[in-house]
Amino acid sequence: EDQVTQSPEALRLQEGESSSLNCSYTVSGLRGLFWYRQDPGKGPEFLFTLYSAGEEKEKERLKATLTKKESFLHITAPKPEDSATYLCAVQANRDDKIIFGKGTRLHILP
Amino acid sequence: EAQVTQNPRYLITVTGKKLTVTCSQNMNHEYMSWYRQDPGLGLRQIYYSMNVEVTDKGDVPEGYKVSRKEKRNFPLILESPSPNQTSLYFCASSRVLERPGELFFGEGSRLTVL
């Protein structure tokens, strides 16, 4: 069964304190791995797609990386406005379902 | 403006009273999907559609129906709602071939079934 596990569930950081969020997955034949950001009361917002091990994508203070078993979302020198829930999702080659992890709630303290 | 529009945004209903949550997108996307989001359980896929007249079950389809008669619309139907369907519902769409996982989400519909 395809599965996505994110850790930690919640993370509190001081402004400027860099860290990483983890997304480990089990899927037979990965078509793509996706990162989203969700603010309270809003729908998720797409951030990145990663297709193969070794691939990296960057956007402002965020960088996503992918290995054969997990992905990391690195946050460099975060600011309070980076506070949100970050969701990881995968899509397998064999069908068109997109499966989400439970997310990591990130809180950046000023 | 590119968007996914859901209605209603908030609804309180009673057990057994049929309801429909509408979803419309203006981006000519092939792929549309419904998710429910519950505390501690995350986003779970209910149904998805690859194109007009093509629908498939997600992980939690029980108690729900969908239809895709037009490319832009993908309504979610609860024929006989029960309290365990109280949840936050999201509709999403994407361009399948080019960007399969780059979903555009609606603002959500918060449903309470008494």
Image: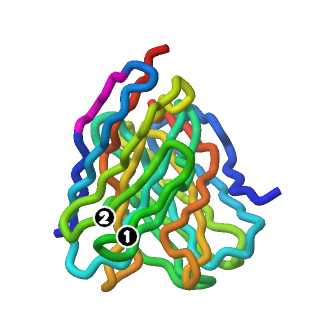
Residue A105 vertical placement versus B105 (above, below): above
Secondary structure state at the residue bearing disc 1: loop
Q: Quadrant of the N terminus of chain B?
A: bottom right
As for residue A73 lying within the magenta part, the answer is: no
Residue B7 point in image, percent of width and height: 69, 47
Residue B77 vertical placement versus A106 (above, below): below
Residue furthest out toward the top: A110
Residue B88 point in image, percent of width and height: 48, 40
Can residue B58 be seen by looking at this rendering? no
Q: In this view, does A89 lie to the left or right of A49?
A: left
Tell me what residue is drawn at x 46 percent, y 66 percent: A49
Q: How dense is the environment of label 1, judged by Cα within 10 Å: few (below 14), some, or many (20 and up)? A: few
Which chain is indicated by disc 2? A
Residue type for callout 2:
Leu
Q: What stretch is highlighted in magenta?
A: A8-13
Q: Name the residue under label 1.
A: A55
Return the disc, 2 or 1, that comes first in the chain's sequence: 1
Q: Mark 2 points at which residue?
A: A66
Which chain is indicated by disc 1? A
- Dominant secondary structure of the magenta stretch? strand
Q: Do the residues labelled 2 and 1 touch (CB within 8 Å)?
A: yes
- Between B104 and B65, the residue placed more toward the observer is B104
Disc on res. A92: none
Q: Distance between the residues labelled 2 and 1?
A: 6 Å
Residue type for callout 1:
Glu
Answer with the quarter of the image where residue A11 lies: top left
Q: Quadrant of the C terminus of chain B?
A: top left
Do the residues at discs 2 and 1 belong to one chain?
Answer: yes
Residue B86 point in image, percent of width and height: 43, 38
Can residue A61 be seen by looking at this rendering? yes
Tell me what residue is drawn at x 21 percent, y 56 percent: A24
